[in-house]
Amino acid sequence: MIAMHHTAWGAKDGAPGRVTSMAQTPDGWLWLATSRGLFRFDGVSFEKYQSQQQPLSSSNVSTVGTLPSGALWIAYRLGGLSLLQNGKIIHLGSKDGLPGSAVRFVVQDQDGGIWIGTPSGLLYKEARASSWHLVKIDGVSERTRISSMLLDDRGTLWVRTLEATVSLARGEKEFRRVADGGSFGQIAKAPDGSIWMCDLDKPGIQMLSPPLKGQAPHFPDLPASNYLFFDPQGNLWLTPNKEFGVMRVEREDVSARISTIDEPQSLTGTPNAVLVDQEGNIWIGTGKGVDRFRRNRLEAIDTPDYIADARPFAAGPNGSLRVDRYILEHPGQQDAKTTLVGPAETSKNITTNVYNDPDGSFWIGAIDGLAHILDGKRIDIDPPSMARKDGPVSGLVKDRQGRLWMARGKTYALENGVWTEGGGIPELKSFTTNVLFCDSRGRIWFGGIGNQIAILDGTQIRLRGDAEGLHLGSIKQITEHDGEFWIGGESGVARYDGKHFTNIMGTGSDSFAGASGLIFNAKGSLWINGLDGISGISAEELGKAKRDAAYKVKFQRYDFLDGLKGTPSQFPQTPTAILGTDGKMWFGTSYGIYHVDPDQMQLNPLRPTVAIRHLRSGDNVFDSESAQSLSLPPGTTSAQIAYTALSLTVPERMQFRYRLDGVDKTWQDAGNRRTAFYTGLEPGSYHFHVIASNNDGLWNDTGATLDFTIQPSFIQTLWFKLLCAIAALFLLYIAYRWRLDHVTRRMRERLQERLLERERIARTLHDTLLQGVQILTMRFQFAIDRLPADLPERLLMEKALDAADQVVVDARNQVMDLRSAPDISTALNHMVVELTESMQPQQKAACEARVTGEPRELKPFIREEIVSIAREAVINALKHADASRIEIRLDYSNAGLLLTVKDDGCGIAPAILNSGSRAGHWGIPGMRERAAELKTTLVINSGNSAGTEILLSVAAQLAYSEAAHSTPWSNLKARVKILMGC
């Protein structure tokens, strides 16, 4: 096929088998009617249409088509019709006036009426009618077989029967006979508006109606055919009756006007159905699969045969090409002319390099020697004797001194008819050269194997390699642009700024491997001929790569999908890309020479429709087309979302981006992958969005969306979390109660130990000291009684006895205190009186102890510690604060006991509060230690000249002897109260 790209899908590709009809809906899906059911195709994979909610009437589908509304009509081999639109199906049958035979054609006219062609007649239903009825055509049997139907651009209905071909113009009531009957055939419309018909038993095609404008094309003699149609360029396609395959006939009178492809030439089978899609692609449905034909963007120009793999070429004057031993004038055009220079090519003298001399002549390097073409004349040059067994010529270049350098593995220089190995440069004698290049400064560059480049500047040679960042392997080509040097090699392309090499990487980590051709066009774009195809990088992208060495450039690529065949030579026929003297870009491969002009290539204008096919999670598949929002079961943590985009020209080049709100922060570039994978998903609502571009980078930014919700399992619900929180609080409460009980029990044990010790001490004091003193005083009294009453010494001794009696009384009181302590209020009052009386006159202060709330019995240990803390606080106020008033307040409550000691003195300096004590004094540390013994906190609020307030709070359970009515909550409140300074 001329300039057509053919792709075939068979059983191994998932094609459904025998395809009897095809249609394309406005969204871009290609629908296939088969005996296995209804299938749809997105250009990549086949998918059988099946819906459990609305199944088809039969799996044996014979014909499909579309209506102007976009609905897909589906006809069954055993009769009946279905309409599918927006995921909903309407079934039609005998109750709607349809016959029992299969429907072959459905056409809706411009007035909304629907015509149906069947093997048993033509039926019609007006726009507002409820059923169809048979149509009577003059001169045609009522039950005639309809073999083809078409509605043209003028609204005329064309009907082909076995008895006649008739037409019905819009607004007319009667059909008009336009052709006599014949065998089966098809009616088709050309892009110019003309109507044509073929016949299964008659050769050639017949024009039924002329074009809307201009003249109809003249087609050559053609065989009888079953199907015919026209592509968007007006070329005719038909399927010959007595020949397998498909035939393409050029609209214009050109050489090789007719081309044919059949099953042995890779057509999947005998054609059964044809279709031209929205993008102008040709689809053939066969008995074994599906074939697609589309126009190639690249086509090799006609060149003479070449014996070797890839041929060398160079630019000639006026846009001509010098291709090995030929000069091509006007290459690729109808008036192309080819001239042979020198003897014909044989296997012994294969041309391997062509070089343009600065003087306008050119050189041809071959296996057997060297030739100079000057003014159209060939001058053969003997190669150096030592080079006769070397490899083929891979490089030729002339320096400013007029020396010709030649690379044949080793390097030689020709000057005054004499060849010199390495040009007389010792370093070059052992340097293996692939490529030669002369820069704008006259320096000669030698590209070698093993990732090395040698630069000859005059007589000085410099080597460049790994140390300068060169990582290209074998060097393929060197070129210069705007003072910078660009090197193509085995591993890619690099830029050299005079000091360092920097590799150029493309998006998708493309390295442009095997770059044996590098050229810059007039726009400053770099074009690369590499193993993966022809790649173009704009000047803007190259600028970004210069500023950021890690930047990955965006690029255009033309490869086998565009008609490029073969691969560029890797050695020795380099360079494989040249810029013609007329500005055209030429690229050579093992198949031929191609001209690339991106500005002249027609871009695909179709923004692809994006569709989400389904969501898969584990073994469950959820149809996304049946609902805009999906609900996934509890326990779902992963999802695979399959999507597609409907552009059938080059679906392999379509690009996708997607984003899952709540998971992806930015768009994810998926390349041409059509599935998104997610793991570790939490319960909640998600919004998935996917967009796509066609093969030419035209994006559909609207794309498609899918909302889905993952239902939480019981352990993921809010109720479960609340229950867990409550359980945790309950466990904390249990732990707190256990700890509190443990501390209380320990304190009770310690208190009991202290009480027992106090009782022991009391007994000891009573049984020994007090009784002993009393006996002594009694004996002393007996002794005194014997003395005269007026004896002065007796008076002194009686006073001593009175003092001893007072000691006994005081000791007895102390013993009483050990056995049963006085009330805390009394103890505080005694403490106040004792302290105030002991102070000097200048330290006297008004001191008051008050009690609020209902007094409760305190545990003895708690009472003693509280009195001791209060004592220390009052002492500090009297001795250090210069207070005039001191207030002691005890507050009884269900929460606990609060002690407050407040004075109006000078306060405590912040430095002392921060350090916790005054140097050499232990009052405040002692109070804090006693508070710690009580398992509570002492709070001191004070400031310079602001007085001091000392707060101590003891929980009820610790303070009161009977604390059954207290609760942990009340204890907690007591602690919060003291911490807040209340």
Image (cartoon, rainbow, N blue to C red):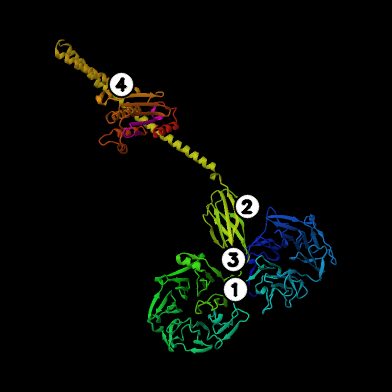
Check disc 2 and report its element: helix, strand or loop: loop
- Callout 4: SS: helix
Q: Amino acid at mark 3?
A: Asn
Q: Mark 1 vs mark 3: which is more N-terminal?
A: 1
Disc 1/disc 4 C-alpha distance (Å): 120 Å
- The three-letter code of the residue at mark 4 reads Met
First-in-chain label (3 vs 4):
3
942 within the magenta span:
yes
User: Residue 123's quadrant in the figure?
Assistant: bottom right
Answer with mark 2 or mark 1, whichever residue precedes in sequence.
Answer: 1
Which part of the image, by quadrant, shows the C terminus? top left
Residue 298's disc number: 1
Identify the residue position indicated by label 4 in the image.
816
Residue 106: quadrant of the picture: bottom right
The correct choice, above or below, for 582 with respect to 674 in the image is: below
Task: Please give the name of the residue rendered at 26% of the width and 37% of the height, measured from the top-left corner.
Answer: 919
Q: Residues within 10 Å of mark 2 (few under 14, many from 20)?
A: few
Categorize mark 3 by other alpha carbons within 10 Å: few (<14), some (14-19), many (20+). many
Residue bounds of the magenta highlight = 939-960
The disc placed on residue 628 is 2
At label 2, the amino acid type is: Gln
Q: Is residue 571 visible in this depiction of the protein?
A: yes
Instruction: Judge the density around disc 4: few (<14), some (14-19), many (≥20) Cα neighbours within 10 Å.
Output: some
Residue 472: x and y in percent read 45, 72
| Callout 1 crowding tier (Cα within 10 Å): few <14, some 14–19, many ≥20 | many
Q: Secondary structure at mark 3?
A: loop
